[in-house]
């Protein structure tokens, strides 16, 4: 049975004023590093820093904890005017007031937050952490008065704790949603900063600079309140004049194939372009870049997703942009590939003029439709079911649930499906018309016998894009957009 160390902090009020930076934005939940600062400050104030220092050093070496916090909402921004203690040129207090802005976060449940670490059987140091937790007097700014406690939990007890669970994702590189977490050396760094503050003023000497804490990690945290989508990079298709090049939406897989071929060439092993640190570069290119199944049972690979133009009533759904999506934790490899592809011309099978790839910012209106956060999503290109449904609704629903799991989406949702497109000017999921003439999107040979459907998914909690599901997800079939994108 697993053992968990938990530290609980309870505020005297339902407002928390901590910020991610000096000018904001608000920090929620309070970061593990802020807790560690509160532990060090509390034990120092109690005169127990030397006694409990080794226990805190053990705590800083642990992985980032699970955080359980109440639901929250942003509070009203309030500006206070307080005396500027450094402004001694004007003796009148009213003449040296400076503005101080508070951006509170309102807790909608019990005003307490828990930090949970899994610990092994060697837990003699935990008693010191429990004692340190009981020395905490505030968490956040000085006005965020709080008290702390700690203890050990077992699996059943942890499962009964209510609140929003914030899970650390150390392999994910992102700025949005990243919280600071202590690491080895954080304790010594905080002591050094405190000593520099005490030595700031010395008679007869210039005012010394106070050192700022620098030893900490940035760890991405995700929860139903702030989901994190898969990493992606977007390219525009440009012609020789630098304008958007248009490709027919029916030939979506041909565009994906051109980009995939360009990626393979860009990661040429003989030229030394694969990312550094990969043990077998040739095998990585074969499985991760090219997407060949041999040695790639988990389907860990880049997905090349052409984006039909949607977002307004006159959108024609032609393809002018391509998104490359990577598995979570592969941001560095994706960024390396994107650098090599920027400005690279594509090659069309059979010859002829082909567009040039140009890296595109994420603020593009069409891109936002695919990568936002929403509870309701709808297919732009049809989902290819990962199996035969025999035209039975029960089997279709089961195969859609399988497709969601294969894409790493573990939230429950309501599903409605059909053959008709969800967005204007998009092609239906039909492969032939009433006269047996081919219509719709071209498919690779191995997908021609499978059923394609357009679907609308409504999740209980918002989900972050991009969402691409189904058997054709690695080349753009099964791409979804937020239903309010049009």
Image (cartoon, helix red, strand yellow):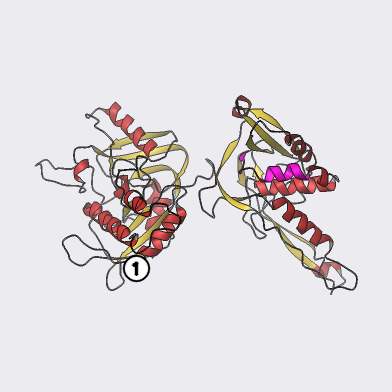
Residue 419 coordinates in the image, percent (x, y):
24, 39
Query: Does residue 141 appear in the picture of this structure?
Result: yes
**Residue at horizontal 85%, vertical 71%?**
88
- Is 445 left or right of 417, judged from the image as shown? left
In the drawing, does residue 4 fall left or right of residue 414? right
Tell me where residue 117 appears, x and y as whole percent: 63, 37
- Residue 22: where, in percent of width, then height? 67, 60
Residue at 34%, 53% (x, y): give it: 282
Q: Kindly state the secondary structure of the residue where label 1 is placed.
A: loop
Question: Considering only vertical position in the picture, is 243 above or below 444?
Answer: below
Q: Nearer the viewer, residue 355 or 129?
A: 129
Left or right of 389 in this view: 200: right
Looking at the rendering, in which quadrant would you find the N terminus? top right
Position of 387 with respect to 186 (left or right) is: left
Q: Which residue is mark 1?
A: 343
- In percent of width and height, residue 259 lies at 29, 58
- Specify the farthest residue to the left: 435
Q: Does 59 sit above or below residue 313?
A: above
How packed mark 1 is, by other alpha carbons closer than 10 Å (few <14, some 14-19, many 20 or more), is some
Residues shaded magenta:
53-68
The quarter holding residue 309 reads bottom left
The quadrant in which residue 261 appears is bottom left
Residue found farthest to the right = 203
Q: Is residue 156 above or below residue 256?
A: above
For the residue pair 64 and 94, the one nearer the viewer reads as 64
Q: What count of labels does the image hold?
A: 1
Q: Can residue 364 be seen by looking at this rendering? A: no
């Amino acid at each position: 049975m697993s053992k968990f160390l938990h530290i609980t902090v309870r505020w005297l009020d339902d407002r928390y004023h901590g910020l991610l930076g000096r000018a904001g934005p608000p920090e929620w939940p309070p970061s593990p590093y802020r807790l560690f600062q509160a532990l060090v400050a509390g034990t120092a104030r109690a005169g127990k820093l030397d006694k409990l220092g080794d226990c805190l050093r053990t705590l800083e070496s642990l992985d980032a904890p699970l955080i359980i916090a109440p639901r929250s909402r942003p509070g009203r921004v309030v500006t206070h005017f307080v005396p500027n203690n450094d402004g001694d040129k004007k003796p009148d207090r009213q003449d040296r007031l400076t503005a101080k802005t508070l951006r509170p976060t309102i807790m909608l449940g019990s005003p307490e937050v828990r930090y949970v670490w899994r610990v092994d059987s060697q837990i003699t140091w935990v008693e010191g952490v429990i004692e340190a937790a009981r020395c905490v007097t505030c968490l956040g700014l000085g006005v965020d008065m709080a008290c702390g406690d700690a203890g050990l939990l077992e699996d059943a007890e942890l499962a009964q704790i209510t609140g929003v669970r914030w899970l650390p994702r150390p392999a994910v590189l992102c700025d949005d949603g990243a919280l600071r977490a202590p690491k080895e050396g954080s304790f010594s760094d905080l002591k050094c900063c405190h000593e520099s503050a005490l030595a700031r003023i010395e008679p007869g000497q210039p005012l010394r600079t106070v050192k700022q804490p620098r030893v900490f990690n940035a760890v991405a945290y995700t929860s139903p309140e702030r989901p994190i989508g898969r990493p992606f990079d977007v390219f525009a298709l440009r012609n020789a004049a630098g304008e958007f090049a248009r490709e027919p939406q029916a030939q979506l897989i041909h565009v994906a194939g051109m980009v995939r071929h360009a990626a393979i060439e860009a990661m040429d092993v003989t030229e030394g372009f694969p990312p550094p640190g990969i043990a077998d570069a040739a095998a990585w290119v074969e499985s991760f870049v090219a997407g060949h199944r041999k040695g790639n049972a988990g389907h860990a690979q880049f997905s090349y997703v052409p984006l039909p133009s949607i977002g307004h009533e006159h959108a024609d759904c032609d393809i002018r942009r391509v998104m490359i999506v990577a598995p979570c934790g592969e941001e560095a490899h994706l960024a390396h590939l994107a650098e090599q592809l920027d400005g690279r011309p594509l090659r069309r099978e059979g010859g002829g003029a082909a567009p040039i790839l140009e890296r595109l910012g994420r603020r593009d209106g069409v891109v936002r439709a695919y990568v936002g956060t929403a509870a309701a999503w709808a297919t732009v290109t049809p989902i290819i079911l990962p199996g035969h449904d025999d035209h039975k609704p029960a089997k279709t629903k089961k195969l859609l649930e399988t497709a969601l799991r294969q894409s790493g989406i573990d939230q429950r949702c309501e599903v409605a499906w059909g053959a008709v497109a969800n967005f204007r000017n998009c092609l239906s999921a039909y492969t032939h018309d009433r006269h047996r003439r081919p219509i719709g999107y071209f498919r690779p040979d191995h997908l021609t016998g499978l059923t394609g459907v357009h679907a609308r998914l409504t999740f209980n909690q918002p989900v972050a894009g991009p969402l691409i599901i189904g058997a054709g997800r690695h080349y753009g079939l099964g791409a979804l957009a937020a239903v309010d994108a049009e």
